[in-house]
Image: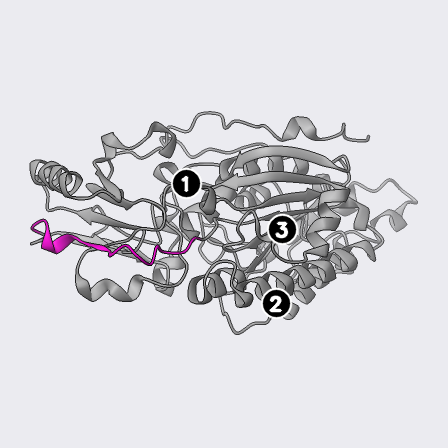
């Protein structure tokens, strides 16, 4: 949030910019909002608005398995992709931050839902609020920080990274994740933000729903419970679209709907591989379990990791063990202090555990398998003033969304120094109609 001094400067700027006799021109400027409210820079107030909606675990084919009238409306009025391919690993935190930054985990820093950083001698864990709210874990600039640095008010009703001061910046409005907050309340708050005066109206808003993922895990993908969650979330999406349509400036709002990954069932006739029955894990830290296990060996144990890889691959026909240099180039896995020394990845539907005690990791549905697996794919829909109705795209990558958001908002990309990021591919911005003067 802007400090009072910065706000005073913007107030004076607005007043000085008004020609004599035209004081009414600032009726919708900072003077019509509370003094402690964040405000948009004058040059940003004519820009469009963007609502980024994430439906966690919404598999690409769920609209063919349940009625989704709101998504169908979006497909008719705007853009629908065939599917959205996640990054590796196909987990919630890495993929959400790739959506927000346009970068793979090796560059944005979140290489899993949980992982260590030897330089900090600390662990990141998605259920640990201290980790989640520590901005030093996040190594790249997400879209809401880029927008804030360029003078836009931002808001978040949940999204990975929005609880932390990334680069010292949080959204102007944000909430700590609480699954007890109903989807209805979240949507109502987003509509309230969009109804604010232009001076304080957020230009970037994130909204997150976890219900589809929850039910896909515990009841199984495609189960009656998971498909009811699909219908319930789609209903709330319809409320959001209707509410935006009722706003006087509703035709200036873009809505992007994404999911971070899909979901698949475990094969009932395949027993999990239990690693400690096959290789020596003494002194080795194991992370996760189910679709994959990440192994962190003690310093200087490179030969030991390679030997474990060879042993696992010689005895397992339902997956593979990979050193970072063995991984497909498309995964952008690099040897670092955050990525593991050995990736043990099951084939889709198969499972791997570090020890038998990790058996609780096996649920009726899961994600974390290779990003190329069709079951791991998510969705992407977009509507807005410059998106032609009935537009279609093939299989996109989660990193393709960020360049489109920059184009929609008219923002300049900002890349942190030293992260090796090249210019991101941009397969979507060319679909936009020319901006009107």
Report x, y in % for residue 434: 76, 27
Quadrant including the C terminus? top right
Element under label 1?
loop
Residue 310 placement (x, y as % from top left): 13, 37
Question: Which SS type dominates the magenta stretch?
Answer: loop
Which residue is the site of mark 2? 183
**Quarter location, residue 428:** top right
Label 2 secondary element = helix
Compared to residue 253, the image places residue 126 above or below, namely below
Q: Dot 1: within a 10 Å radius of its alpha carbon, few (fewer than 14), some, or many (20 or more) residues? A: many
- Residue name at image x 78 percent, y 58 percent: 242
Give the number of callouts.
3
Does the magenta-highlighted stretch encompass residue 274?
A: yes
Image-based side of 298 in relation to 201, left or right: left
Observer able to see residue 340: no
Give the mark nearest the N terminus, 1 or 2. Answer: 2
First-in-chain label (3 vs 2): 3
Task: Return the residue nearer the eye: 300 or 31.
Answer: 300
Question: Which residue position holds label 1?
Answer: 371
């Amino acid at each position: 949030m802007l400090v009072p001094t910065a706000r005073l400067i913007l107030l004076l700027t607005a007043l000085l910019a008004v020609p004599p006799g035209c004081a009414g021109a600032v009726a919708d400027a900072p003077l019509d909002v509370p003094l402690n409210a964040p405000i948009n820079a004058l040059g940003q107030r004519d820009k469009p608005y963007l609502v980024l909606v994430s439906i966690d675990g919404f598999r690409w084919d769920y609209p063919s398995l349940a009625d989704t009238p709101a998504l169908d409306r979006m497909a008719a009025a705007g853009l629908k992709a065939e599917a959205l391919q996640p990054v590796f690993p196909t987990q919630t935190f890495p993929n959400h931050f790739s959506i927000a930054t346009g970068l793979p985990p090796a560059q944005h820093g979140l290489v899993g839902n949980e992982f260590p950083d030897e330089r900090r001698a600390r662990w990141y864990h998605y259920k640990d609020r201290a980790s989640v709210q520590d901005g030093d874990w996040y190594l790249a600039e997400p879209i809401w920080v880029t927008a804030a640095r360029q003078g836009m008010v931002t808001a978040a009703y949940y999204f990975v990274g929005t609880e932390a001061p990334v680069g010292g910046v949080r959204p102007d409005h944000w909430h700590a994740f609480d699954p007890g907050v109903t989807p209805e309340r979240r949507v109502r708050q987003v509509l309230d933000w969009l109804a604010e005066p232009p001076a304080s109206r957020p230009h970037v808003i994130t909204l997150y729903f976890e219900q589809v993922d929850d039910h896909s895990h515990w009841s199984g993908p495609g189960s009656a419970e998971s498909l009811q969650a699909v219908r319930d979330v789609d209903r709330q999406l319809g409320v959001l679209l209707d509410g935006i349509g009722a706003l006087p400036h509703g035709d200036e709002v873009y809505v992007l709907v994404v999911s971070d990954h899909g979901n698949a069932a475990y094969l009932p006739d395949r027993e999990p591989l239990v690693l400690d029955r096959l290789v020596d894990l003494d002194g080795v830290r194991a992370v996760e379990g189910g679709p994959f296990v990440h192994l962190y060996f003690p310093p200087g144990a490179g030969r030991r990791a390679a030997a474990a890889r060879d042993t696992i691959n010689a005895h397992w026909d339902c997956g593979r063990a990979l050193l970072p240099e063995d991984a497909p180039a498309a995964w952008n896995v690099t040897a670092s202090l955050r990525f593991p020394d050995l990736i043990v990845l099951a084939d889709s539907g198969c499972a791997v555990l570090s020890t038998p005690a990790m058996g609780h990791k096996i649920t009726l549905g899961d994600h974390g398998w290779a990003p190329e697996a069709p079951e791991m794919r998510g969705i992407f829909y977009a509507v807005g003033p410059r998106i032609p109705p009935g537009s279609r795209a093939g299989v996109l990558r989660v990193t393709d969304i960020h360049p489109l958001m920059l184009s929609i908002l008219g923002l300049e990309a900002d890349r942190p120094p030293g992260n090796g990021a090249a210019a991101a591919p941009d397969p979507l911005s060319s679909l936009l109609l020319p901006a009107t003067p």
